[in-house]
Amino acid sequence: MVSTHNLGFPRIGERRELKFALERYWRGEINTEALEETGKTLRLRHWALQGELDLLPVGDFSFYDHVLDTSQMLGNLPTRVDKNADALIQYFQASRGQAGSTCCDHQIDAAEMTKWFDTNYHYLVPEFTADTDFSAHPDRLLSQITEVKTAGYNAKPVLVGPVSYLWLGKTKDESDKLALLERILPVYAEILDGLAKAGVEWVQIDEPILVTELSVEWQQALQKAYFSLAKSQVKLLLTTYFGQLKQNLQLACELPTAGFHLDAINAADEIIRVVDWLPSHKILSLGVINGRNIWKTNLNQTLNLLEPIHKRLANRLWLAPSCSLLHVPIDLQSEQHLDAEVHDWLAFAVQKLDELQVLARALNAGRDSVTTQLADNNQAIQRRQQSTRVHNPAVKQRCEAIQPELALRQSNYTERAAIQQADLQLPAFPTTTIGSFPQTNVIRQARKQFRLGQLGNAEYQQQMQAEIRYAIDKQLELDLDVLVHGEAERNDMVEYFGQQLQGFAFTDNGWVQSYGSRCVKPPIIFGDVSRPRPMTLEWTQYAQSLTDKPVKGMLTGPVTILNWSFVRDDQSRSETCKQISLAIRDEVIDLEAAGVKIIQIDEAALREGLPLRQSQWQAYLDWAVESFKISANGVGDETQIHTHMCYSEFNDIIEAIAAMDADVITIETSRSQMELLDVFRDFDYPNAIGPGVYDIHSPNTPSEQSMVELLKLAAQRIDKQQLWVNPDCGLKTRRWEEVEPALKAMVSAARLLRNQLAA
């Protein structure tokens, strides 16, 4: 009999119940007991939704982040947390920081947060030193095992593996992380023994680093770890996801575990090799349902793959999603307003588990046992393939006609810069912002009323114009050099554009967790993308009519729109990105024709799309950079093109960034005290750059002197003539009372440096 299981389930709740409970708790509106009760309610609800599985996950639920949960379970929270506080308070101190503890007189900084492999989920980075020690604290996990058993389900605890845990962390003293393996393994062994005593049979132990390019040292660490943990009384399911094993395939198959999980979506071409290589006593779990996207699985096609494997493995074959379902929304049935045709093509977490059960029944009892389900699925697959809304011949023809010169500016940067400066007459150290200004309750309410039809078009336009006028007046008052319209009309930098492009669909409740209580609702790119009409022209023209100073046209770039959406799976991501780039190009050309002299095309997520293996980076960067250049380079030399990248470790792709050939790039550097600019000591960046001089994610008002010092540090790495002055990101999440003094200090810092330069 084929068995079914799941690697993880979304935590936030169908209506984001966890988000709202967390935020109420942080505001002091509910106590710990109420928060814990919300967590328990959600766990029980989610286990019920997974109840037909042979094994369902436990330990995948988290109040903030599963890697941070692991750190707490291993006794490795940052040393700065209050050791006298209870466990939950310590946990949130590590995840969110604390500005002045009730028991301490010092600020507690939050742990660093970064992307979970190549997903849009963020984890809290473990911190190590040479002296780091570990201890077992599995109480929360054990209590959840009791909960799930009491509820009558057969559960499989989920752990982040010891080697991946070390790999994911950072040392604070430049010591060797791998030297800690000897200390961490006995703690894992203790936790596994505790799980065995609790009656657990199987433990899912995640080692996603097996899909990355591992050095010999890390490969040896995996061998050492699992030969050590093989003594445990529980059965270990070694789990990988997000990619191919490649040179790690033999290692993964031969590690002494009772089972192995392969991402059969991303590593489809390795399935047969794994089947051949896997020892005859091992369970093979195949992740045949895509846990990263929202399209229905082609069940008949998947069965064609599985049936011969089932004949070979029989009850040694398990079925699962490719990875945790953390990365998709919970239930498609909550979507009451989604276009019916698009709705027919989709599967969220609950529907993916239904698909899993159909596959298992087909293998265990034959396809005849699920005739209706297979027929319905096949019809939906065919309807999507044949839909005229998916395929637009005009878009296809336009993409096929793309020539290399479409991605080239008329002249090189030096020539363009001289023309632009003669036209714009900007001072040294020109000041600007990244684009957005505070999204007040008044703005949000107006957008909501307009969306619901409670506010007419004329009234809405008047309200948005009033907000634009306010933002322009404030910038003029502050004496910024290059202005923005403030983006009052925009709910989200991707959703706003997707709503005006053909080929996109949007959900009401398609939320996924980004980190903690932060949730995002990615657009769905279901078809060929085109721009029916201008998207930003009216608002930008209005803003420019209010001032003689240049106002930037503000756009989101094609790569960012792609990487922050659920993307169609019936053509390459590069092809979809080129379609988006042509749509954005049309907007750029219209803005220029309307007299807009500076256009910013944000590519915040360019680096996020990098493949996990460095050997595959260049192929991605080639089409990603080309897509940006297609969108940006249909303009004359006198039009200045800006781009923005936020919170990116961009040093290792600096050549690709330079190849984008944006006249000005703005980046986040304030948190690192300009250390991210060290790459410019060795790399002669040719164009202008605005290193963010203050952290907009902090409510603290930066001083003029602090920004002067940061700019002086920047000037040690970059020529003064290339430097712009700006915050590190957009200001939509801040309040005006925070923004005004910060920008006033920023303008003053720039003015001081101009005077010093002139002296």
Image (cartoon, helix red, strand yellow):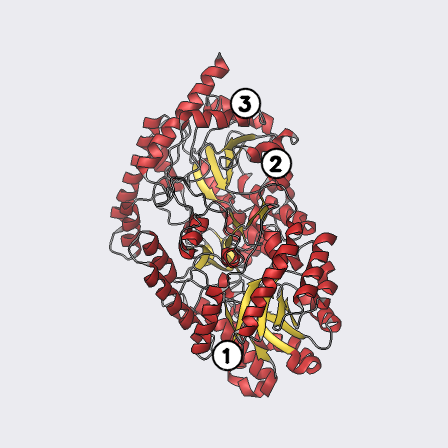
Classify 10 Å Cα crowding around label 2: few (below 14), some (14-19), many (20 and above).
some
Position of 207 with respect to 108 (left or right) is right
* Label 2 residue SS: helix
Gap between marks 1 and 2 measured at Cα: 50 Å
Residue picked out by circle 2: 658
Q: Are marks 1 and 2 in contact (CB under 8 Å)?
A: no
Between discs 1 and 3, the one toward the N terminus: 1
Which of the pair 626/356 is nearer the observer?
A: 356
* Left or right: 669 in relation to 183: left
Q: Quadrant of residue 219?
A: bottom right
* Structural distance between the alpha carbons of marks 1 and 3: 64 Å
Per the image, label 3 sits on a secondary structure element best described as helix
Q: Which amino acid does label 1 sit on?
A: Asp
User: Marks 1 and 3: CB-CB under 8 Å?
Assistant: no
Residue 9 vertical position relative to residue 212 in the rendered view, above or below: below
Left or right: 113, with 206 as reference point: left
- Residue matched to label 1: 376
The one of 653 and 89 positioned closer to us in this rendering: 89
- Up/down of 232 relative to 641, above or below: below
Q: Distance between the residues labelled 2 and 3?
A: 18 Å
Q: How many numbered tags mark residues here?
A: 3
Name which residue type carries label 3.
Answer: Lys
Q: Mark 3 points at which residue?
A: 720
Nearer the observer, 395 or 491? 491
Counting residues from the start of the chain, the first of labels 2 and 3 encountered is: 2
Camera-nearest label, 1 or 3: 3
